Image (tube, rainbow, N blue to C red):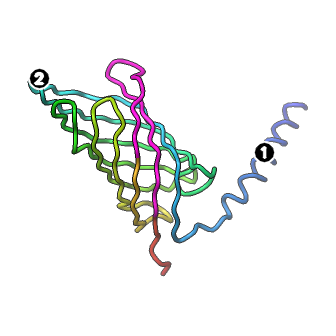
Amino acid sequence: MIKKSMALILTLLLLATAGPVVAEEMAREGSGTGRVYWTGTFDVLPMGKELVQMNYDGYGVQVSDTGKGLFHNATGHVVGGLLGVKGVYENDSGLICYTRPDGDQIFLTYKCSGTMGKSAKGTVTFVGGTGKFVGITGTGEFTRHSLRSPAKGAFASFAVTKSSWKLPEKK
């Protein structure tokens, strides 16, 4: 009986908290700031002493500074690569797919530059999405901070983000 009561209470609590989120109308444009935490794996192709090609595949989670918004509690998948010359890179670029808690996705491209193992600055461009985010446009910027590697062949980092976006007019 206690298990059934607990299950009922949990169900009612979930319905009470999820209802407003599901019913909330999405703004047609906006901006936000937050943090995204990444971890993943990479492959390195050293080319002599001064050049290195690094390709990576990672997963992360983003939270907004306000506790709500476009990317709050979204998960991300990033695929990218860079060419390092004497430990410096100016061409780190790739694609990010964010999946929001409601299942809709937002797609971005990014570019950044920096020094291997140190902070990097970059920009993002919104290139589309699924569901209510089809046709989304926007831009953003970020500062990525490298963290100590959790394992050989793995990376960890976090980025402080700022973005603005706009959805197309409803037809």
What element does badge 1 sit on?
A: helix
Q: Say if 67 sits above or below 166 in the image.
A: above
Disc 2 from disc 1: Cα separation:
60 Å
Q: Position of residue 39 (x, y in %)?
A: 42, 32
Name the residue located 26 percent from the left edge and 43 percent from the top edge: 92
Name the residue located 10 percent from the left edge and 27 percent from the top edge: 47
The residue to which callout 1 is attached is 11
Q: Within the image, what quadrant is residue 9 found in?
A: top right
Q: Position of residue 19 (x, y in %)?
A: 73, 58
Q: Say if 94 sits above or below 118 in the image.
A: below
Quick one: label 1, few (<14), some, or many (20+) residues within 10 Å?
Answer: few
Looking at this view, is 49 or 96 the one in front? 49
Label 2 amino acid?
Answer: Lys
Relative horizontal placement of residue 162, taking residue 64 as reference (left or right): left
What element does badge 2 sit on?
A: loop
Q: Within the image, what quadrant is residue 129 found in?
A: bottom left
Q: Position of residue 86 (x, y in %)?
A: 16, 30
Q: Within the image, what quadrant is residue 84 found in?
A: top left
Residue 49 tag number: 2
Q: Quadrant of the N terminus?
A: top right
Picture mark count = 2
Relative horizontal placement of residue 106, taking residue 34 as reference (left or right): left
Relative horizontal placement of residue 28, taking residue 78 as reference (left or right): right
Where does the magenta region start and end? 143-164
